[in-house]
Amino acid sequence: QVQLVESGGGSVQSGGSLTLSCTASTDISSINALAWYRRAVANSREQVAAISRNGVTTYLDSVKGRFTISRDYAQNTVYLQMNSLKPEDTAVYSCAAAPWVPTTQHIRLIPTYRYWGQGTQVTVSS
C-alpha cells in the first residue's frame, strides 16, 4: 500500500506560479510511474504530466512549456512546477503512482495508476 499526500495548492492570479508536491509513504525509486492528474468542476479527470522510472516525461498539450514534473528520491516526492497559470488550469490536482507498467507508453493511461492522493485545489483568477 502506498499513501500519497499532496500539498502546495492555493489561489493565484493569472500568470502566477505554484509548485505542487506529492510525498509518498514508500521509496519512489521503486515506483515505475508517477503522474499528476486534474479534475475541474463538471469535467473528467485528465492527466497533466507523468514521469516514468527511467525519466521519460509526458505532458498534456495545453500545459507544455508551462508545467514541469520532477521528482526527488531523497524526499520521496514528486513535484509539479506550474508557471504562467491560466484560469482554465483551475482544478483539483491529484498525484498517482504505478508500481508497475507494461511499457513506457502506459504511463499516459489512467488504469495504469493504482494509488492516488486526495488532491489539492488550485484556483487561478483572471
Image (cartoon, rainbow, N blue to C red):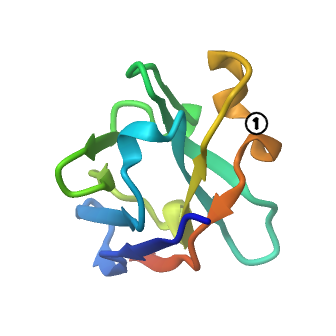
Instruction: Name the side, left or right, on which 75 lies relative to 13.
Output: left
Whether residue 126 can be seen here:
no
Q: Residue at x 41, y 67 (%)?
A: 25
Q: Pinpoint residue 3: horizontal percent, then vertical percent.
A: 52, 71
Q: Pinpoint residue 11: horizontal percent, then vertical percent.
A: 34, 83
Residue extending furthest left?
A: 74
Q: Nearer the viewer, residue 53 or 93?
A: 53
Whether residue 46 can be seen here:
yes
Dot 1: what SS? loop
Number of numbered discs? 1
Task: Name the quadrant containing residue 43.
Answer: bottom right
Q: Is residue 72 above or below residue 41?
A: above
Q: Is residue 19 above or below residue 117?
A: above
Local packing at callout 1 (Cα closer than 10 Å; few below 14, some 14-19, many 20+) is few
Q: Nearer the viewer, residue 120 or 98?
A: 98
Instruction: Name the side, left or right, on which 41 lies relative to 25.
Output: right
Q: Residue at x 64, y 46 (%)?
A: 47
Task: Name the quadrant containing residue 65.
Answer: top left
The residue labelled by disc 1 is 109
Q: Pinpoint residue 76: horizontal percent, then vertical percent.
A: 29, 55
Q: Nearer the viewer, residue 104 or 27?
A: 27
Q: Is residue 96 above or below residue 42?
A: above
Q: Residue at x 54, y 76 (%)?
A: 119
Q: Residue at x 62, y 65 (%)?
A: 1
In which quadrant of the rendered image does the C terminus lie? bottom left
Q: Label 1 sits on what residue type? A: Leu
Q: Pinpoint residue 41: horizontal percent, then vertical percent.
A: 73, 78
Q: Is residue 75 above or below residue 99?
A: below
Instruction: Name the side, left or right, on which 51 lies relative to 97.
Output: left
